[in-house]
Image (cartoon, rainbow, N blue to C red):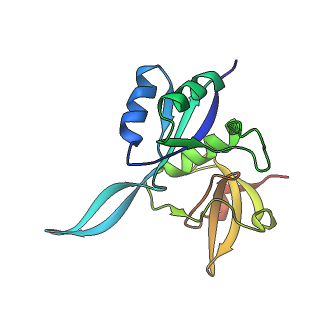
């Protein structure tokens, strides 16, 4: 079978060993990270942190994912389609994953807005044509009175970054 991206919720602070196990098997992984400011001993420091704690993405076949689940029965769960009574892992479309990776690898502050936002699709769908987020597709929407660029992985996560200048945006129908 063909590999796809899948989202895993990892418990008991086991992301690092599970990621190392996956990469040892030749499976690509991704952890959404951002740089945040925080007070340190000598003033302001910039620290890399996970955007969404306990979230690990893997690019693998469904068979490999089932084997991983058998080995780590209580340490992880995968995201499945809503209403799926068989609880099969839900593949993430490559376009959604690509945009999500661009935004959460840009180095700037990223705001996690939950797993879903109602009325997400009321915002204008756009593609970023320049700058740090070039190639990402998402929505422009007001969040707490500020215009933001939102990228979503359906049922898994919605993240927002600061407003992007209109000259770098093109509408998508």
Q: How many marks?
A: 0
Of 152 and 170, the residue lying toward us:
152
Residue 127 image position (x, y, % from top left):
70, 51
Q: Residue at x 37, y 55 (%)?
A: 49
Image quadrant in which you'd find residue 77: top right
Position of 5 relative to 45 (above/below): above
State whether residue 93 appears in this view: yes
Residue 67 image position (x, y, % from top left):
55, 24
Of 58 and 101, the residue lying toward us:
58
Of 30 and 66, the residue lying toward us:
66
On screen, residue 43 versus residue 18, left or right, reads left
Of 159 and 116, the residue lying toward us:
116
Residue 19 image position (x, y, % from top left):
42, 34
Which residue is at the far right?
A: 173
On screen, residue 137 versus residue 49, left or right, reads right
Which residue is at the far bottom?
A: 145
Image quadrant in which you'd find residue 24: top left
Position of 109 relative to 147 (above/below): above
- Locate the N terminus by quadrant: top right
Q: Residue at x 14, y 68 (%)?
A: 41
State whether residue 135 appears in this view: no
Image quadrant in which you'd find residue 90: top right
On screen, residue 41 versus residue 78, left or right, reads left
Q: Residue at x 64, y 60 (%)?
A: 150
Q: Residue at x 77, y 57 (%)?
A: 125
Residue 124 image position (x, y, % from top left):
78, 63
Position of 73 relative to 21 (above/below): below
């Amino acid at each position: 079978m063909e590999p796809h991206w899948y989202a895993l919720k990892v418990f008991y602070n086991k992301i690092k060993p599970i990621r190392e196990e996956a990469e040892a098997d030749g499976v690509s992984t991704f952890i959404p990270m951002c740089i945040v400011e925080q007070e340190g001993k000598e003033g302001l420091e910039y620290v890399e942190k996970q955007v969404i704690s306990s979230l690990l993405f893997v690019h693998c076949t469904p068979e490999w994912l089932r084997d991983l689940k058998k080995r780590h029965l209580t340490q992880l769960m995968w995201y499945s389609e809503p209403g799926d009574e068989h609880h099969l892992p839900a593949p993430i479309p490559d376009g959604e994953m690509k945009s999500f990776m661009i935004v959460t690898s840009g180095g700037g502050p990223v705001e996690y807005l939950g797993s879903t936002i109602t009325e997400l699709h009321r915002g204008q769908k756009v593609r970023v044509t320049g700058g740090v987020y070039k190639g990402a597709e998402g929505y422009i929407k007001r969040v707490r009175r500020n215009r933001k660029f939102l990228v979503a992985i359906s049922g898994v996560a919605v993240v927002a970054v600061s407003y992007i200048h209109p000259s770098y945006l093109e509408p998508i129908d």
